[in-house]
Amino acid sequence: MLAGGCLMILLVAGGLIYLSARVEKHEDTAKAEMAAKISAAAAKEREAAIAAKQVLVGMKRDEVERAWGKPEKINRTSSGAGVREQWVYETGFYVYFGNETVTSVER
């Protein structure tokens, strides 16, 4: 049996002879379709949050700006884990970014 597929064999003169291998893409296609549905649902959730002036974990910088505008101040920290940003808003909210997305929001 092949990973993600099936093995086809043919019986000839009492012995087994390998005929062909066929990889089934059904599982991969189903996983890709599910990932696309989840991604589309997440995008809709983020758009609804922007319309409601809310910031969610997972948003990108441009989405945060669309929801709350530009921050009053941006603090950057570099470490072995990479660059993290803290956006400071006049309202007393802080938005933290890691790997280009919001990792937390605090007040």
Image (spheres, rainbow, N blue to C red):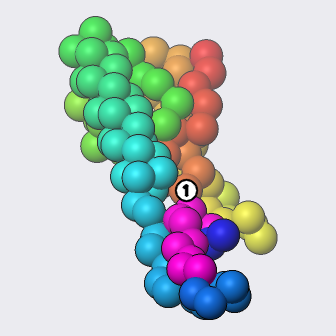
Residue type, mark 1 in image: Asn
Kindly identify the residue that appears in the image at 44 percent across and 63 percent down: 24
In this rendering, the answer to whether 32 lies above or below 19 is: above
Tell which residue pokes out farthest to the front in this image: 13
Kindly identify the residue that appears in the image at 34 percent across and 43 percent down: 33
Nearest the camera: 50 or 43? 43
- Residue 47 spot, x, y in % from top left: 25, 24
The answer to which quarter of the image holds residue 45 is top left
- Residue 62 spot, x, y in % from top left: 28, 43
In this rendering, the answer to whether 54 lies above or below 70 is: above
In this rendering, the answer to whether 22 lies above or below 85 is: below
Residue 18: in magenta span:
no
**For this view, does 83 lie left or right of residue 8?**
right
Nearest the camera: 25 or 7? 7
Answer yes or no: is residue 69 visible.
Answer: no
| Residue on which disc 1 sits | 99
Kindly identify the residue that appears in the image at 66 percent across and 58 percent down: 77
Tell which residue pokes out farthest to the right in this image: 80
> What element does badge 1 sit on?
loop
Q: Tell me the quarter of the image containing the C terminus.
A: top right
Q: What count of labels does the image hold?
A: 1
Q: Main secondary structure of the magenta part?
A: strand
Nearest the camera: 10 or 76? 10
Nearest the camera: 58 or 66? 58
Q: Tell me the quarter of the image containing the N terminus.
A: bottom right
Answer yes or no: is residue 10 visible.
Answer: yes
The answer to which quarter of the image holds residue 96 is top right
- Residue 91 spot, x, y in % from top left: 45, 15
The residues colored magenta run 3-11
